[in-house]
Amino acid sequence: MDVHSKDFLWGASTAAHQVEGNNRNSDWWALETGHGRDMFEPSGLAADSYNRYPEDMRLLADAGLKAYRFSIEWARIEPADGVFDDRELAHYRAMIDEATKNGRKPVVTLHHFTNPLWFVQRGGWTAPDAVEKFTRYVQKATEILGGVEWVITFNEPNMLTLLISMAETLQGNDGAALTAPPEGSRLPTPSLQLGARIAEAHRAARDVLHENTIANVGWSISASALVATPGNEQKFVETKYAWEDFYFEVARDDDFVGVQSYTSQIVDAEGVVPHPEHPDNTLTGWAYRPDAIGIALRNAASIVGDVPILITENGIATSDDTRRIEYTTGALSAMMAAIDSGVDVRGYLHWSALYNYEWGHWAPTFGLIAIDRETLARTPRPSLAWLGSVANQEDAAWAAIAAS
Ligand code: BGC
């Protein structure tokens, strides 16, 4: 699809736990306020987007961004095993209605890292009936998904498996508080066994969604733009498979696939190499690599074939908004080169719409709209108007992308 067509989805993304606030029945809330309290800051009220979402959506739409990706929260909809909260379902339906006004398009994620606490307490994703429990929630959620054209079952199933393995590794004995792993330590390789379980849940959810809604269904994958180092090609292939290619293979049967890219990493004899320190590293400690999205898109397309791609996340943690515009200009230039080489990209959703809770930390500020942590006042950054000007096909923005 032509990026200049009116159907190309230009927008921004968020996730419930990172912006809503007070997600009290979730496993992450329990972690932040319990055994993870020494390692993580609490999410608390977050950006209070649970109440302020009309303002957030209006700011995006006024800037010219027609698509808003957000997640509905399983832990709110089903706060106890088998108990569904109709008020929360109505709340999310109201969000969908707001995001659909004036031809706008919601992209709805059903699972973005958080689980209901009850689900985790009974064994989480390794419990024998985990898929059944998730599918029951998805079935219920279809009641409010009427008219939604884009549904993501799982956000980053590959990072979800990694998070689950890390939680197991870091888990202190007898409920002892978690401590952060030493800086620069390597992440474990995501477990393919667990990945297969999440894939089973994805397929079951997809079937339920196809039966009950008109939605295009897919999942969104963390794409690390991995690059081999000389002599380690075999390790590279194995590592890339466990980190992401397995998940792209599953997407071959989907209506679309979400690609989420921020940076690039090399693979040596032991696997993925942590980012070396560098003055250009972003606030998450990641290498500044606007070109990463190009590597990520080509790798995705080489596996999913003609399944359309939505860029469901791309962005930078920085306090310097000029740098955010510079990064995104470079990323869009890399996206255009990938499209020119034949990759079928249907949309670009920036991460993030708002400054948000970055899984345990408030300092890394992704976002087109700043949030004052005291007053919760919203201040659009220049990058919001700039991305709007890209979406509105303004010449100056496109000339900079072409020149980048
Ligand atoms: C996640 C987001 C996260 C972002 C930046 C992705 O892994 O989907 O929830 O905030 O990257 O770290």
Image: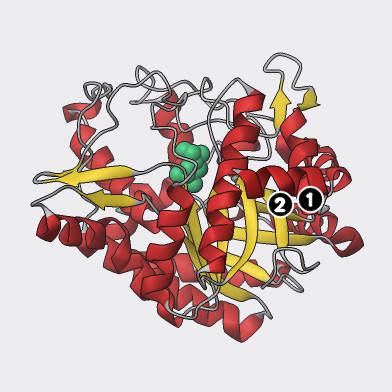
Kindly indicate whether the residue at mark 1 contacts the one at mark 2 (C-beta within 8 angstroms): yes
Who's the residue at 38% across and 68% down the image?
248
Quarter holding the N terminus? bottom right
Please tell me whether mark 2 sits on a helix, a strand or a loop. strand
Circle 2 residues within 10 Å: few <14, some 14–19, many ≥20: many
Q: How many numbered callouts?
A: 2
For this orientation, the residue located farthest to the top is 374
Label 2 residue near ligand 1, CB within 8 Å: no
For disc 2, the marked residue is 11
Q: Nearer the viewer, residue 310 or 197?
A: 310
For disc 1, the marked residue is 65
Q: Amino acid at mark 2?
A: Gly
Circle 1 residues within 10 Å: few <14, some 14–19, many ≥20: many
Query: Closer to the N terminus: mark 2 or mark 1?
Result: 2
Residue 398 in the image: above or below residue 368: below
For this orientation, the residue located farthest to the right is 102
Gap in Å between the C-alphas at discs 2 and 1? 5 Å
Quarter holding the C terminus? top right
